[in-house]
């Protein structure tokens, strides 16, 4: 597709940011209506149930993987030069960062993307946690936590010269990604039907996955139509949240690019979906103990996401669809971290809540 008209009128950076804004807006609508959430899926699974949340996550994952791999096989997409496949791979960052992120998203009741979506629906707990998540991510990227992040990330490196694509690394066939997406889709459809998913759950979950595909496709086509280097990338929310925060707080603090368009787009899309569905509702903290939980969760996610090279969407969907070795390891570590935290912390928290009088119980979070 030719973007010359938009580039002539908006410039290269403006066009790239507009693409992020549009895809983010659609992502926000689909994510809000489907209630897509990795944390909810993990908690449901580790408690011995494959229910609607797992089905929704598998539908999203299969759409992202299948769509991305189909474009690659058709020659419409080349992501070999993307950061996830062309830079070194930190196994130590993927494992430790994934565990931290998984623990954090259970404590904060959602990953970075989910907090952004919830914040737009009036959830002030999510808004506070999301801002703290972005601030800690920025501190981990370029601030006070950056030396510690670099030290951990550099302690166990898989490659420093590329070669980080899982299918090729393991010598598997070109259609392996398609087969995996089909298996995930079949499982998701079976359990989706059993759990009687709503129409919006089906549409929204697949839509979220396709927005990942759209992000890859858009940035790839922009990469060879611009004079300035354009990163081939897709949906992720750790680095973009940090960059967007700096863009609005400090003029010139971050370039206008796909990431800076993405985050406001998701917020706007989720807000519009909440208003149109009449599900917008202001919610806040009910006690200090609950607030401490969210602070700890957001902090762990901000640092963990930077270590892991992506969030639940960045590593789980974008990196997973690219079959980045470190992204798959990070995703597995997020599942492990979330499951362990739910078992050791969250179930005890809920047990304590049920023992309190109804009027003193902490809020129930989406």
Image: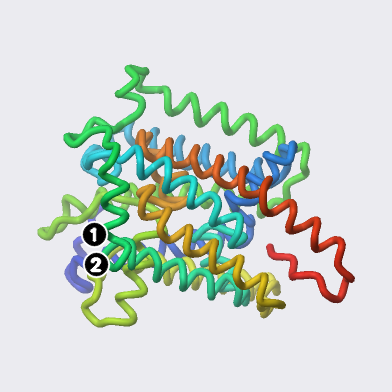
Q: Measuring from the top left, give residue 143's x and y in whole percent.
A: 28, 68
Image coords of residue 230 (percent x, y): 20, 56
Check residue 302 in the rendering and tell me which mark sits there, or answer none: none
State the residue position of label 2.
6
Residue at left 58%, top 33%? 185
* Closer to the camera in the image, 41 or 7: 41
Give the quarter of the image for residue 252. Answer: bottom left
**Can the viewer see residue 320?**
no
Residue drawn at point x = 57 percent, y = 70 percent: 126
- In the picture, measured across the screen, residue 70 lies left or right of residue 282, that is left
Kindly state the secondary structure of the residue where label 2 is placed.
helix
Q: Looking at the image, which is closer to me, 228 or 89?
A: 89
Res. 53 in view? yes
Q: How is the image coloured?
A: rainbow
Residue 240 percent coordinates (x, y): 35, 63
Q: Quadrant of the C terminus?
A: bottom right
Left or right placement of residue 183 versus residue 92 in this view: right
Q: Nearer the viewer, residue 181 or 126?
A: 126
Residue on which disc 1 sits: 3
Q: Residue at x 42, y 23 (%)?
A: 176
Q: Quadrant of residue 320?
A: top left
CA gap, disc 2 to disc 1? 6 Å
The picture quadrant where one finds residue 13 is bottom left
**Where does residue 247 sit, x and y in percent of width and height?**
30, 76
Q: State if disc 1 and disc 2 touch (CB < 8 Å).
A: yes
- Relative to 196, does residue 363 appear above or below in the rendering? below
Judging depth in this view, the residue of 187 and 237 nearest the camera is 237
Note whether 86 is above or below 223 in the view shown: above
Mark 2 surroundings: few (<14), some (14-19) or many (≥20) residues within 10 A: some
């Amino acid at each position: 597709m030719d973007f010359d008209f938009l580039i002539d009128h908006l410039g290269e950076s403006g066009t790239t940011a507009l693409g992020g804004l549009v895809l983010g807006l659609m992502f926000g609508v689909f994510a809000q209506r489907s209630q897509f959430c990795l944390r909810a899926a993990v908690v449901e699974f580790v408690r011995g149930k494959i229910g609607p949340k797992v089905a929704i996550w598998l539908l999203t994952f299969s759409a992202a993987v299948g769509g991305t791999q189909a474009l690659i096989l058709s020659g419409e997409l080349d992501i070999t030069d993307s950061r996830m496949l062309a830079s070194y791979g930190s196994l130590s960052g993927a494992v430790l960062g994934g565990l931290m992120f998984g623990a954090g998203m259970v404590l904060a009741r959602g990953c970075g993307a989910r907090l952004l979506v919830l914040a737009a629906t009036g959830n002030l707990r999510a808004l506070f946690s999301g801002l703290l998540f972005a601030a800690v991510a920025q501190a981990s990227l370029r601030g006070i936590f950056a030396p510690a992040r670099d030290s951990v990330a550099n302690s166990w490196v898989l490659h420093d010269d590329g070669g980080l694509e899982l299918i090729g690394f393991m010598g598997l066939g070109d259609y392996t990604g398609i087969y995996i997406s089909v298996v995930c889709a079949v499982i998701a459809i079976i359990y989706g039907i059993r759990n009687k998913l709503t129409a919006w759950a089906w549409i929204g979950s697949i839509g979220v996955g396709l927005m990942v595909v759209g992000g890859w496709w858009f940035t790839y086509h922009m990469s060879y139509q611009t004079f300035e280097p354009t990163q081939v990338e897709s949906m992720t929310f750790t680095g973009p949240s940090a960059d967007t925060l700096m863009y609005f707080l400090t003029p010139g603090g971050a370039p206008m690019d796909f990431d800076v368009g993405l985050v406001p787009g998701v917020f706007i899309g989720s807000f519009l979906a909440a208003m149109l569905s009449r599900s917008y509702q202001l919610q806040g903290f009910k006690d200090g103990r609950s607030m401490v939980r969210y602070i700890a969760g957001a902090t762990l996610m901000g640092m963990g996401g930077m270590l892991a090279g992506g969030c639940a969407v960045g590593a789980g969907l974008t990196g997973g669809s690219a079959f980045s070795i470190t992204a798959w390891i990070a995703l597995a570590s997020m599942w492990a971290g979330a499951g362990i935290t739910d078992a050791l912390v969250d179930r005890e928290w809920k047990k304590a809540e049920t023992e309190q009088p109804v009027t003193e119980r902490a809020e129930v979070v989406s």
